[in-house]
C-alpha cells in the first residue's frame, strides 16, 4: 500500500493523518516542516526500544533535539500522578513553546500525552503516533485527551487537536493477537454506524484481515480514519449528537469494563459485547429486524471478537444498569443509547426503560 493522507478539516486547526507502511521514519521531516525544534517523546514502555526509538532516530536525523519520557503500559498510567511526573520532567528539561510533544503508543499514551501537552505552558503542539489498531482508527484522531479519577474514566481532560497523526500500519503487524483483534471492534463499529460497504468488506475478507494482509490493513485504517475525520470535522466538541454516534456499543461496554475491572476485558472486547447488546436492545424495541443483530453477531464472531462475557463470575444486570446510569451519556438519569436503525445508520435514543435493558442483560445469564 502506498502512503495516503486523510485530512481532518477544522479551520485553522485542520491537520493531516498520514497512513502507510514505514511512516515512523518520516516523523522527523514532518515535525521540522511544522516548525518544531525539539521533541518530547512520551512513549509506552512496550514500544520504547522499537517504534519510539525509530521516531527518536527520525527526529535526530532531521536535526531536532529529543527528550524521551517512557510511560508504563496500562490504564493506570492515565492518572493525575503520572501527568504530574511528566509536567515536572518537562519543566526540569526547560521545555519551551518551540517544543512539540509526540505520543508513541496506544490509546493510554495518546490520551495522557495529549492532556499533558494541552495543559503544559497553556498548550504545546502534540503529534499522535498511534501504534495500536484502536489508536490508529479511533483514539488518536479527534483531539479527545484525558486522565482518570477514582470516580471514573476520562473525568479530567481537554479537547486538544493534534498537529498531525502518523499512522504506520507496519506497527500493526507485530501487535499481540488479542490486542489486534480487539481494535477490530472499533472498525466493525464504523461499518455498523456509518458505512455498509465497510461492513461488507469486513464480512467478505475476515480471513485476510485476521492474517493482517497489508492491503487490508491499509484499506481499513484509511476508511476508518476518513469516517472519524468526517464526524469530528462536523461535531468536534460532541455538541450536535453526531460525534456521540461513535459511542455505539460503548454504554454497555464501559459498564462491563468498569464491572469486571479494566484490563480483564480489553476495551474493544467490551465494545464488541456492547454492540451485541445494543443491537439486541434495538430488536426488542422494534427498531431493527432480528436478522441484522444476527448478522452483526456473525461478523464479530468471524473477526474473533466476543459477543458475550467470557465464562466466570459475572456482574449482575442490576449493577450494570446502575453503572450505565452514571455514564456521562445519561441525561437526567434516563438511559440513552446509540442504536441502529439499519446497517450503516444509528441514532441517539433517549428515555429507554431500564426494564428492557435488564431483559437484554438477563438473556445472558
Ligand atoms: N472515541 C470517541 C470519540 O472520539 O468521540
Image (cartoon, rainbow, N blue to C red):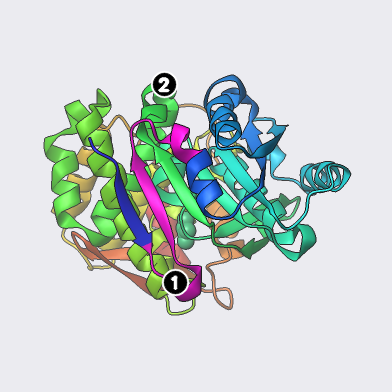
| Element at label 2 | helix
> Where is residue 352, by image quadrant?
bottom left
Q: Position of residue 104 (x, y in %)?
A: 56, 37
Q: Nearer the viewer, residue 71 or 23?
A: 23
Compared to residue 56, the image places residue 93 above or below, namely below
Q: Which residues are magenta?
A: 8-27
Residue at 30% from the left image edge and 29% from the top image edge: 304
The reply, left or right, for residue 31 in relation to residue 195 is: right
User: What residue does disc 1 label?
Assistant: 10
Q: Is residue 261 above or below residue 18?
A: above
Q: Which residue is denoted by mark 2 in the rendering?
A: 174
Residue 228 image point, x, y percent: 36, 59
Q: Is tag 1's residue or tag 2's residue first in the polypeptide sequence?
A: 1
The residue drawn where x is 59% and y is 20% is 49
**Quadrant location of residue 53?**
top right
Residue at the (19%, 46%) spot, across then down: 294
* Disc 1 residue: CB within 8 Å of ligand 1: no
Classify 10 Å Cα crowding around label 2: few (below 14), some (14-19), many (20 and above).
few
Quadrant containing the N terminus is top left
Eye-nearest disc, 1 or 2 = 1
Point 86% across, 45% down: residue? 88
Q: Any mark on residue 96, and which?
A: none
In this rendering, position of residue 193 left or right of residue 170 = left
Amino acid at each position: 500500500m502506498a502512503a495516503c493522507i486523510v485530512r481532518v478539516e477544522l479551520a485553522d486547526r485542520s491537520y493531516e493523518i498520514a497512513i502507510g507502511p514505514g511512516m515512523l521514519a518520516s516523523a522527523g521531516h514532518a515535525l521540522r516542516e511544522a516548525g518544531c525544534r525539539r521533541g518530547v517523546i512520551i512513549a509506552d514502555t512496550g514500544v520504547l526500544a522499537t517504534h519510539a526509538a525509530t521516531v527518536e532516530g527520525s527526529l535526530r536525523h532531521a536535526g531536532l533535539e529529543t527528550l524521551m519520557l517512557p510511560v508504563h503500559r496500562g490504564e493506570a498510567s492515565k492518572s493525575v500522578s503520572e501527568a504530574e511526573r511528566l509536567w515536572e520532567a518537562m519543566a526540569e528539561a526547560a521545555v519551551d513553546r518551540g517544543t512539540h510533544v509526540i505520543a508513541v503508543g496506544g490509546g493510554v499514551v495518546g490520551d495522557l500525552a495529549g492532556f499533558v501537552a494541552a495543559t503544559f505552558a497553556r498548550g504545546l503542539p502534540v503529534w499522535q503516533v498511534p501504534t495500536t489498531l484502536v489508536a490508529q482508527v479511533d483514539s488518536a484522531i479527534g483531539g479527545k485527551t484525558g486522565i482518570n479519577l477514582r470516580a471514573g474514566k476520562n473525568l479530567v481532560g481537554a479537547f486538544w487537536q493534534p498537529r498531525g497523526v502518523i499512522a504506520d500500519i507496519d506497527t500493526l503487524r507485530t501487535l499481540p493477537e488479542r490486542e489486534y483483534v480487539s481494535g477490530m471492534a472499533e472498525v466493525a463499529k464504523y461499518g455498523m454506524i456509518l458505512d455498509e460497504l465497510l461492513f461488507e468488506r469486513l464480512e467478505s475478507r475476515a480471513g485476510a484481515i485476521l492474517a493482517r494482509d497489508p492491503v487490508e490493513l491499509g484499506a481499513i485504517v484509511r476508511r476508518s480514519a476518513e469516517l472519524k475525520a468526517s464526524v469530528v470535522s462536523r461535531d468536534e466538541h460532541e455538541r450536535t449528537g453526531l460525534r456521540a454516534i461513535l459511542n455505539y456499543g460503548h454504554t454497555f461496554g464501559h459498564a462491563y469494563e468498569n464491572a469486571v475491572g479494566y484490563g480483564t476485558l480489553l476495551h474493544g472486547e467490551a465494545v464488541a459485547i456492547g454492540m451485541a447488546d445494543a443491537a439486541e436492545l434495538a430488536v426488542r424495541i422494534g427498531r431493527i429486524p432480528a436478522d441484522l443483530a444476527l448478522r452483526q453477531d456473525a461478523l464479530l464472531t468471524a473477526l474473533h471478537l466476543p459477543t458475550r462475557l467470557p465464562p466466570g463470575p459475572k456482574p449482575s444486570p442490576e449493577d450494570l444498569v446502575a453503572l450505565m446510569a452514571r455514564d456521562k451519556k445519561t441525561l437526567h438519569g434516563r438511559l440513552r443509547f446509540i442504536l441502529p436503525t439499519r446497517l450503516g445508520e444509528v441514532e441517539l435514543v433517549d428515555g429507554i426503560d431500564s426494564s428492557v435493558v435488564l431483559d437484554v442483560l438477563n438473556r445472558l445469564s
